[in-house]
Amino acid sequence: MNPIAEILIEQVICAQEVGKQILSSSGLDSDNVIYAFATPDTLVINCKDYATTWQFDEEQCKLQLAIARIRSSIQTILIEKAGKPLYCW
């Protein structure tokens, strides 16, 4: 495989693992989350339905605490439904 592709795949896997770690730590992991990933400054959570998206809005504090616990530099949380951005804070 192309070395650049290998590096990119490794970075994607790492981003997904950090996203899952934040969701698990916050107690907000759910079967209604399609995917979550984190870059150094953004956490992206893609939800299957509106009820799940609003749950994240209502539980922002839990996400912020989970981000702080892992000492991440994440500043933005983006909530998506079916891959389309709904809101961020």
Image (cartoon, rainbow, N blue to C red):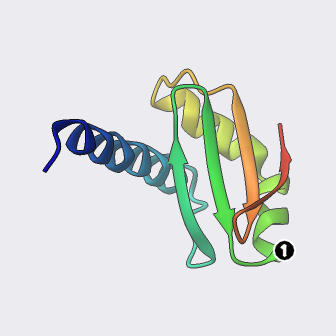
- Relative to 15, 58 lies left or right: right
Q: Could you say which is closer to the camera, residue 27 or residue 36?
A: 36
- Relative to 67, 75 lies left or right: right
Q: Position of residue 53 (x, y in %)?
A: 79, 65
Which quadrant holds residue 67?
Answer: top right
Q: Position of residue 58 (x, y in %)?
A: 85, 55
Density class for disc 1 (Cα within 10 Å; few <14, some 14-19, many ≥20) is few
Which quadrant holds residue 34?
Answer: bottom right
Q: Position of residue 69 (x, y in %)?
A: 50, 30
Instruction: Please report the residue visible at 77 percent of the width from the left and 78 percent of the height from the top.
Output: 49
Q: Could you say which is closer to the camera, residue 2 or residue 63?
A: 2
Q: Is residue 52 above or below residue 88?
A: below
Q: Could you say which is closer to the camera, residue 65 or residue 88?
A: 88
Residue type indicated by callout 1 = Tyr
- Circle 1 residue: 50
Quadrant where the C terminus is found in the figure = top right
